[in-house]
Image (spheres, rainbow, N blue to C red):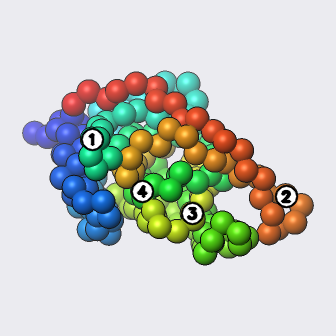
Amino acid sequence: MRTYRHSLKALRDAALAHTLEKNPDLASLSRELGGIIHRDAQALADGLAGLRKRSRGFERWLLGRRGRPGVSVLVMAWPPGYSTPSHDHAGLWGIELSLYGALEVESWSRATTAEPWQLRGRNWLGPGDATWFDADIPYMHRCRNLSRQETALTLHVYGGDLEDYASYEQAESVALWHKQRQRARIAGPLRV
């Protein structure tokens, strides 16, 4: 019988194995990670129940990390109804998948930093569903837990350590956004 620790290890190992190049195939990696999540959904839900019940707000947990090329694998806990501010990923590529619950991801991009942000669209992620973004285009998004009662859990794979990033607040003019530097915090490591 597969335990949630085996499932987390499989997710971490797949993420690290598929990201040995600077620009990995994010669609292929998303399919593989989504397959593991679909296969092991109940084990992950049961094993990570402690994260869902912590009631300590939004948290980021480190599942794995590699230095060259840089990759970090994180599990995030989203309290009921929690929404991030619109934010970038400091030029990193990334993949975000739902492990438990459902998330809405609203995304923007722009051709250059001199141009206004353009809404790209919204995605709704259930367990095993993914969205991803490349490092070569300016990108930001806002994520929201769609449940008002339950904590959602997500898996994130980034092309480096997401330590410093920027959040954005839309000004009165739709085309103008105010940028503010942020520092990401990790609650701790997840042991597998």
Q: How far apart are marks 4 and 1 (CA)?
A: 15 Å
Residue 94 image label? 4
Where residue 168 appears, as percent x and y from the top left, is 71, 52
Residue 85 image label? none
Q: Distance between the residues labelled 4 and 2?
A: 27 Å
Label 3 element class: strand
Where residue 139 appears, as percent x and y from the top left, is 57, 63
**Which is nearer the N-term, disc 3 or disc 4?**
4
**Which is nearer the N-term, disc 4 or disc 1?**
1
Residue position marked by numbered label 3 in the rendering:
139
Can you say which quadrant of the picture contains the C terminus? top left
Residue position marked by numbered label 2 in the rendering:
171
Q: Distance between the residues labelled 3 and 2?
A: 18 Å
Residue 66 image label? 1
Query: Which residue occupies 32% across, 64% down?
Result: 23
Kind of residue at disc 3: Tyr
**Residue found farthest to the right:** 172
Q: Tell whether 139 sits left or right of 126.
A: right
